[in-house]
Image (spheres, helix red, strand yellow):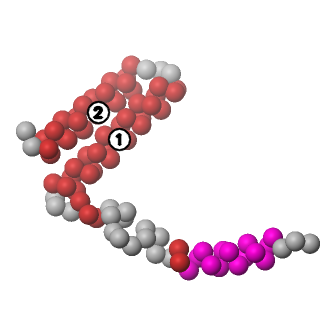
Amino acid sequence: MTPLQIGLLGVIGLLGVGCYGLLITRNLIKVVIVLQILVKAVVLALVLAGQAGGQAGLSRFSSRRSSWPWSWQVRPAARRAWARAWRPP
């Protein structure tokens, strides 16, 4: 089996566990946990789809640059504003 097929089996397994958990449980905390399992299955499916399509590097955290390109402009301005607002009396 290829790694892609193993990942797809994992996605199907997680989706199965999540759907079964939603049908069976009525406790709110357990429902939240089951929803988190479903979210993990969806994220795993998206990652596998990107890898299968050869575009796994399209996530916003995969580049070498900062994920917030404007942060170098905002931080000094925020520091100046904070320094003006919190001057001692």
Q: Quadrant of residue 66?
A: bottom left
Provide the major secondary structure of the magenta segment. helix
Other-residue count near label 2 (Cα within 10 Å), few / some / many at <14 / 14–19 / ≥20: many
Residue at the (32%, 47%) spot, across then down: 43
- Indicate the amino acid at tag 2: Leu
Magenta part of the chain: 73-86
Q: Quadrant of the N terminus?
A: top left
Residue 9 in the image, given as x and y percentages of width and height: 18, 35
Element class at badge 1? helix
Q: Earlier in the sequence, mark 1 or mark 2?
A: 2
Residue 38 in the image, given as x and y percentages of width and height: 35, 37
Residue 3 in the image, given as x and y percentages of width and height: 14, 44
Point out which mark residue 14 bears: 2
Disc 1 from disc 2: Cα separation = 8 Å
What residue is pinned by disc 1?
Answer: 40
Q: Quadrant of the C terminus?
A: bottom right
Residue at the (52%, 26%) spot, across then down: 28
Vertical side of 55 occupied by 5: above or below: above
- Indicate the amino acid at tag 1: Lys
Element class at badge 2? helix
Dots 1, 2 in contact, CB < 8 A = yes
Residue 40 in the image, given as x and y percentages of width and height: 35, 41
Magenta stretch contains residue 57 = no
Vertical side of 84 occupied by 21: above or below: above
Vertical side of 52 occupied by 85: above or below: below
Residue at the (37%, 35%) spot, across then down: 37
Q: Is residue 66 left or right of residue 28?
A: left
